[in-house]
Image (cartoon, helix red, strand yellow):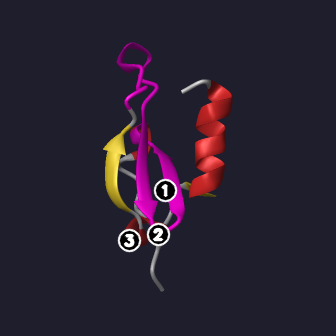
Amino acid sequence: MTTWHERMTDWHKSTYTHWEENACVEVGSAPGLIGIRDTKQWAMPDETRPILVLPAESFAALLDHLGR
């Protein structure tokens, strides 16, 4: 069974990462989907590392709501 970590590509740190407070998230994508994960959990096995998966339209709406 394919995991979200295998399906999502182009993982990169958000441009809104706040280094001083260690508040970093990574964003990845799959066709029509966006994944968000916490960089502090990098050492966890992929099978247990949580990812918030949203439809691309919902992710865009979230960014609009947050004021980008």
Where does the image place residue 44, in percent across and percent down from the top left? 41, 54
Amino acid type for the residue under numbered disc 3: Glu
Q: Secondary structure at mark 1?
A: loop
Magenta stretch encompasses residue 27 = yes
Which quadrant, please, contains the C terminus? Answer: top right
Name the residue: 34% across, 52% down.
11
Q: Secondary structure at mark 3?
A: helix
From the viewer's perspective, is residue 45 above or below residue 15?
Answer: below
Q: Which span is picked out in magenta?
A: 15-39
* Residue behind mark 3: 6
Amino acid type for the residue under numbered disc 1: Arg
From the viewer's perspective, is residue 41 above or below residue 4?
Answer: above
- For marks 3 and 2, give the CA distance: 13 Å
Lateral position of residue 60 relative to residue 37, left or right: right
Lateral position of residue 68 relative to residue 24, left or right: right
Q: Which mark is residue 31?
A: 2
Q: Earlier in the sequence, mark 3 or mark 2?
A: 3
* Residue behind mark 1: 49
- For marks 1 and 2, give the CA distance: 21 Å
Amino acid type for the residue under numbered disc 2: Pro
Where does the image place residue 36, in percent across and percent down from the top left? 50, 48
